[in-house]
Amino acid sequence: MRRPAVKIAYLGVVAAAYASITLALAPASYGPLQLRFAETLKPLVMWEPDLIPAFVLGNLLGNLGSPWPWYWELVWMPCANLVGAWLCWRVGRVNAYLGAAVYAIVTAAAVSTMLSSVLHAPFEPVALPILGSELLLIVLGVPVMWPVHLVLRRVAGYHAENARAR
């Protein structure tokens, strides 16, 4: 088990990384396609469920630069990340790629609901490209984040009980 100070620092680093990448790539992060390269970090929750709050907080902080209404970006989307991250962790224990796909579907559904409401557009035409980008980024994040997870685990001195390559 990690010491509380190390755990908080770890959560802060991951939340800051997600928010920083989102804000640094701001035009692409908030467009109708929502191409957020920070999404590749999300598979970390499969091996480190303690990081679920980091993605909720990182999403909230990253959305501070969003042009969309605050109640969608600062309430709806962090809640969607909470649900998506938890499902990713649960499903990802069986199959990492399936867990990542579930997270992508939850995120895409939430973003599409927000955009179709704000833009007064039909859901399906908005949802398909967003689902494609979310699947691409989060599912490709699985092989990218596995070695990152191993390095972070070693640096933090933490040995996850269920951490294994899938």
Image (tube, rainbow, N blue to C red):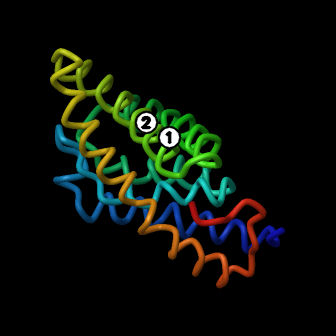
Name the residue: 36% across, 47% down. 63
Disc ID at residue 133 = none
Tally of numbered discs: 2
Residue position marked by numbered label 2 in the rendering: 77
Which quadrant is the C terminus positioned in?
bottom right
- Which residue does the numbered mark 1 point to in the structure image? 81
Image position of 136 (left or right of 86): left
Q: Which residue lies furthest to the bottom in this view?
A: 155
Q: In which quarter of the image is residue 125?
A: top left
Residue 61 image position (x, y, % from top left): 44, 52
Tag 1–tag 2 contact (CB < 8 Å): yes
Give whichever of 26, 113 is nearer the camera.
Answer: 113
Instruction: Please tell me whether residue 115 is drawn above or below residue 60 in the rendered image.
Output: above
Give coordinates of residue 12: x percent, y percent.
58, 66
Q: Disc 2 on helix, strand or loop?
A: helix
**Rendering quarter of residue 47:** bottom right
Residue neighbourhood size for the residue with mark 1, other residues' Cα within 10 Å, grouped as few (<14), some (14–19), many (≥20) = many
Residue type at numbered disc 1: Asn
At a point 32% along the width and 23% down the height, the residue shown is 113
Query: Helix, strand or loop at disc 1?
Result: helix
Residue drawn at x 82%, y 72% is 3
